[in-house]
Structure formats: C-alpha cells, structure tokens
C-alpha cells in the first residue's frame, strides 16, 4: 500500500540531509565520485524548493545532483518511487528508463530497476508493458523473482486472466516464505472461484465443479467456495447436497452465514427438510450473534406460522440484540397489529429506517477499512482477496435501555 504524504516529505528531508553531507564532504576533500560538480549549488536550489513546499521540483533537482552509478542507485530508486507515489507516474517511468539506458549497473541492479519500472507501469495502467517486462524477470535471483511473481499476479488480476494468475501463484508458492503461503493460497482459491463463475455463466456445471474442487484443495476455509457449491448443487437438482455445502459457510466464518441464508432456506424446502427450518434458523441466529441472521429466522417463521408468531419471536431478540434492522422489521410486522393512525406512523418510521439501511455500507475490508454497499471478494481499496466482510449493525445501547413492547 502507498505510504502517507508525510512519510514522503520525511524521505525528501533525509535525502536533502544526505546530499548536504556529501556536499560538505566534497568541499573538504575536493572530490566525491557520487556527486556532480554542481552538487552544492543544486542542493541549495533543491532545498529551497522543498522549503517552499514544491517537492516535485525538489525531486528533479536532487535527481540532477546525483551521478548514475551503483553507489547512488538506492537514492535514485527512492526518488523514482516518490515521483510515482505523488502521482507523477510518467516522470517516474522516464527516470527508471534513463537508469536502464545508462548501462552503469550490474545484472542484479538492473533487475531492481525493472521491478520499480513495473510498479510504475502498473500505476499508469500500462499492463501490457508490465507483463512483457515481468517475463524478463523469470531468470532473476529468487528474491527478485518472488517480488516479480507477486506483481504478475496483480497484473493478471486487473486483466482478469485467471489461468495466468493461477500459474503465477503456483510458482510463487514454491519459492515464497512460509508466512506468506496462507495469503497466496487464499488468492489462488479465489482465482479458481473466478473460473467457476465463468463456468456458471456459460452453464458448464462440470467446469464449475472441477474448479471448486481445486479451490478446496488449495484453501478449504474460503467460504466463497461453499456459497458457490450451494448454488451449483441447487442448479444440478441436488438440494440436500446444497444444504450440506451452505451449512459449512457458518462453520468456517459465521459472519457470512447471512449470505447463505436465502439459498439455504430454498434448498431446505426443496429437499423436504422444512420441518428442520425453524431450528436451523434459530441456531443460526445464535451462532455468530448477527442481527441479519435473526431476520432470516423471522422470515422463515412468518412463512410457516404467520406474522404474529414471527413478531413474538422477534421482539425478545430485539431487546437482547438491538439494531436498526431488527427495529425496522419489528415496525413493519407491527403495522398490521395496530390502528389505522398508528399504522401510518409506523409505516413512516419503518420507511425511514429502511431507507437509512439501504444508504449505509453493509461490508468493510478488514485490511484497509474500505466500505461497500455490495459484496466484493476482491477489495477495491487494497486489492486483497477474501477480507471484505459483512458489517455488524447492532446499536451500541445496553440491553437494559430497551424494553420489549407489549
């Protein structure tokens, strides 16, 4: 992820201090191979730009102040990164290309420059150039190749080239450190799920089944697999298998139980397990402590036993787990129980509450905090897989503050 602007300013100050020291060193000993002859003058001009809040011009001056050689490579790379992170992607690309054209660096150093150039290509949306350059890094040392494969996965994700992304992930799993394996495995399982989605859209259920089987082998705790398995088995006319798959969603991640609720209810009915529905729905309400799971139970009870019983079930739950969504549903159910005037008031209150819920985010990325109204498996904010989770919308009042309406 990109660092805050204050960090960039701090890096610029460090670079300025370093150049100041080198300038002083050169003035004492008359020669320093990493500096051009105009270093002292360039340094003071660049520092003036920095103090006048013109960091882009300061970066240009600092780049000019440094010779291009192995001793100054780290500083050149840092300055190019600052340009990219400040949105000056074209200038960053040009700087890295000039470094490569200089022919002043060893093979490994050229790999390091190319890695940064790929990052700038990706930032500029030049994915075809990124892909071509990454192909040159397949023979790089393991540390460079690991970085290159991670960048390749990012490129293939953006291009929706899931087969290529899987190939890169498979290769990366062979060389990455152990603490990175679980994240890469989760990524790879999502790539198989994406291929399964393609199979669903084309109606090829065998492809869907095979891709989901591959996804489970790589990362069995990815709940997306079981949501898709439920859909697959339902389409294949196997509601009991669909129920078995959908129940695993709550087992692996209770916060996603709501996402499986509607398909679970439909397949319970199809499989003749409707007598077990109320028990499963109530169990789901307890498991994970989620208000949206309680609403699933309310909907099932209303269909089977009527709205009166549904309301009787809901009101105690509202007292124990107060939330806007439960309040809205209780108001909606109570409309038919009250007088005409009271119904009008309740309808208005319910409408406002429901509108509030519709306009609120329902999902948030656990990694970067990005909030969304609809479910995304790949976070738009940080491009991490499987970290967008449903939000808990419970009201932060104590239980004693609310009394059950009579």
Image (cartoon, rainbow, N blue to C red):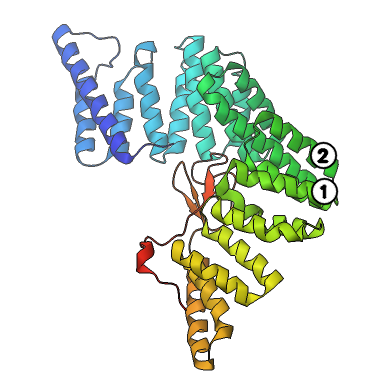
Secondary structure beneath label 2: helix
Front of the two marks 1 and 2: 2
Q: Residue at x 28, y 15 (%)?
A: 35
| Residue 177 picture location, percent across and down | 52, 18
Q: Which mark is residue 202?
A: 1
Which is nearer the N-term, disc 1 or disc 2?
1
Residue 129 appears in the rendering = no
| Residue 134 picture location, percent across and down | 60, 24
* Residue 148 as seen in the image, left or right of residue 106: right
The CA span between labels 1 and 2 is: 10 Å
Q: Residue at x 48, y 76 (%)?
A: 352
Residue highlighted by disc 2: 207
Image quadrant occupied by the N terminus: top left
* Residue 347 as seen in the image, left or right of residue 277: left
Secondary structure beneath label 1: helix
| Residue 348 picture location, percent across and down | 49, 83
Q: Residue at x 32, y 37 (%)?
A: 56
Mark 1 vs 2: CB contact within 8 A: yes
Q: 10 Å neighbourhood of mark 2: few (<14), some, or many (≥20)?
A: some
Query: Which residue is situated farthest in the bottom direction here?
Result: 340
Q: How many marks?
A: 2
In the image, 48 versus 402, the foreground residue is: 402
Quadrant of residue 217 within the rendered picture = top right
* Residue 21 as seen in the image, left or right of residue 207: left
| Residue 233 picture location, percent across and down | 80, 48
In the image, residue 69 above or below residue 231: above
Q: Residue at x 40, y 72 (%)?
A: 403
Residue 337 appears in the rendering = yes
Quadrant of residue 334 within the rendered picture = bottom right
């Amino acid at each position: 992820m990109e660092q805050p602007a204050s960090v960039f300013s701090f890096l610029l100050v460090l670079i300025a201090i370093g150049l100041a020291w080198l300038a002083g060193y050169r003035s004492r000993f008359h020669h320093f191979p990493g500096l051009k002859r105009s270093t002292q003058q360039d340094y003071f001009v660049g520092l003036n730009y920095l103090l006048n809040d013109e960091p882009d011009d300061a970066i240009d001056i600092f780049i000019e102040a440094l010779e291009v050689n192995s001793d100054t490579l780290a500083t050149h790379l840092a300055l190019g990164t600052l340009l990219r992170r400040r949105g000056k992607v074209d200038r960053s690309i040009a700087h890295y290309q000039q470094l490569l054209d200089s022919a002043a660096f060893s093979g490994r150093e050229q790999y390091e420059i190319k890695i940064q150039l790929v990052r700038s290509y990706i930032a500029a949306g030049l994915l075809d150039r990124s892909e071509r350059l990454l192909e040159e890094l397949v023979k790089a040392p393991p540390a460079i190749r690991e970085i290159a494969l991670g960048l390749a996965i990012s490129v293939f994700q953006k291009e929706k080239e899931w087969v290529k992304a899987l190939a890169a992930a498979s290769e990366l799993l062979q060389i990455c450190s152990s603490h990175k394996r679980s994240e890469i495995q989760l990524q790879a399982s999502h790539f198989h799920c994406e291929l399964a989605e393609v199979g669903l859209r084309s109606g090829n259920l065998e492809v869907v089944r095979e891709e989901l089987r591959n996804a489970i082998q790589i990362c069995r705790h990815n709940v997306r697999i079981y949501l898709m398995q439920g859909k697959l088995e339902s389409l294949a006319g196997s509601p009991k298998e669909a129920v078995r798959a959908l129940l695993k969603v709550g087992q692996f991640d209770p916060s996603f139980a709501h996402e499986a609720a509607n398909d679970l209810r439909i397949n319970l009915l199809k499989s003749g397990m409707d007598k077990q529905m109320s028990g499963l729905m109530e169990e789901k309400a307890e498991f994970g402590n989620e208000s949206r799971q309680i609403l699933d139970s309310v909907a099932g009870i209303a269909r089977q036993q009527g709205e009166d019983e549904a309301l009787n079930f809901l009101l105690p739950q509202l007292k124990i787990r107060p939330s806007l969504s439960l309040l809205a549903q209780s108001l909606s159910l109570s409309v038919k129980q009250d007088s005409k005037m009271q119904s009008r008031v309740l309808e208005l209150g319910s409408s406002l509450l429901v509108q509030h819920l519709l306009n609120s985010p329902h999902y948030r990325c656990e990694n970067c905090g990005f909030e969304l109204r609809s479910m995304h498996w790949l976070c738009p904010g940080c491009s991490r897989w499987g970290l967008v989770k449903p939000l808990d919308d419970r009201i932060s009042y104590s239980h004693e503050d609310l009394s059950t309406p009579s």
